Image: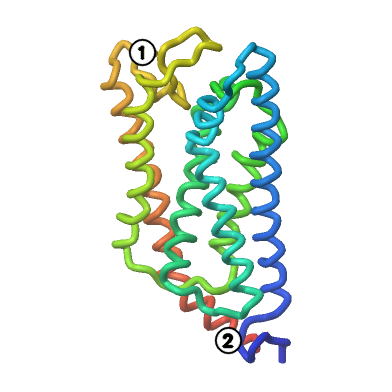
Amino acid sequence: MALTWRGEGVNVARRVLFVIVRLVVAAAVCFAVVRQLTTSLDFWRAGGVENVTVYVVNFFSFFTVEANLIAAAAALIGGALLVAGRMPDSRWFLVLRLCATAYIATTGIVYNLLLRGIELPQGSTDALSNELLHVVVPVLVVLDWLFAPGRRPLSFTNVGIVAIYPIVWVVYTLVRGPLTADPLRGVTTWYPYPFLDPSLSPLGYGSVAIYVVAIAVIICGVGALLVWIARRFGRDRAGVDAASA
């Protein structure tokens, strides 16, 4: 009989493993964000920027940074719940996990397909932070969704919840972009990613709309796939855990 916490049928070794994975995710995000922000601050100051407030707001307006911070928060909460033996996941945490996984997986997909090798307007890119935020963390979070204990079946209606934050982020970005100057680059607008800047395409906002729709499809598609995984394997995994006790 495997050792268990609070008499539940979940193997201790597996729970300890994913407590560690979640702590690694949170630590990697904090390390990478602080390291990249420090690198960017040095870059901005070297360029003669005295008031870096707008640039710091720009930094935290990147979907990548926000998605990683959401993933870190979910990882910390999830690690605490595993330590406390709260199994299976409550609905609110499972939905948070779903959103965090969908956002960070989309971040990895979009960056590696569209943005790898392109200098983004946060300043000089730190290579280690870049790989942590766009490769390592997305992979670990997806593995957590696939194999960590506690996941249970979800309704496909939750895919609609996944879509809420990206919609708000796009609206915020497109409204703020024309109102935010970037003196360092000598432009009067600021967009976190080239495909959101209508001035970079002959189609203008038409091109932006195409990219936004494509990324929305990816996010919702990833969310739907994650829900399918939870529905298909959630009970099976719970049964495996119970059988191992």
Q: Residue at x 32, y 28 (%)?
A: 175
Q: Residue at x 41, y 21 (%)?
A: 180
* Front in this rendered view, residue 207 or 237: 207
Q: Amino acid at mark 1?
A: Ser
**Could you say which disc has been placed on residue 134 in the image?**
none
* Front in this rendered view, residue 90 or 143: 90
Q: Is residue 122 left or right of residue 167?
A: right
**Could you say which disc has been placed on residue 242 in the image?**
2
* Disc nearer the start of the sequence (1/2): 1
Q: Amino acid at mark 2?
A: Ala
Point out residue 127 in the picture as x, y percentages from the top left corner: 70, 30
Q: Residue at x 41, y 16 (%)?
A: 189
Q: Residue at x 42, y 70 (%)?
A: 232
Q: How many marks?
A: 2
Point out residue 38 in the picture as x, y percentages from the top left corner: 69, 31
Q: Quadrant of the C terminus?
A: bottom right
Name above or below for residue 37 compared with residue 150.
above
Point out residue 242 in the picture as x, y percentages from the top left corner: 58, 86
Q: Nearer the viewer, mark 1 or mark 2?
A: 1
Classify mark 2: residues with Cα within 10 Å, few (<14), some (14-19) or many (20+): few
Instruction: Name the element at disc 1.
Output: helix
**Circle 1 is placed at which residue position?**
199
Name above or below for residue 195 compared with residue 217.
above
Q: Is residue 67 left or right of residue 124?
A: left
Q: Residue furthest top?
A: 186
Q: Quadrant of the N terminus?
A: bottom right
Q: Residue furthest front?
A: 51
Q: How far is mark 1 from mark 2, CA to CA?
A: 57 Å
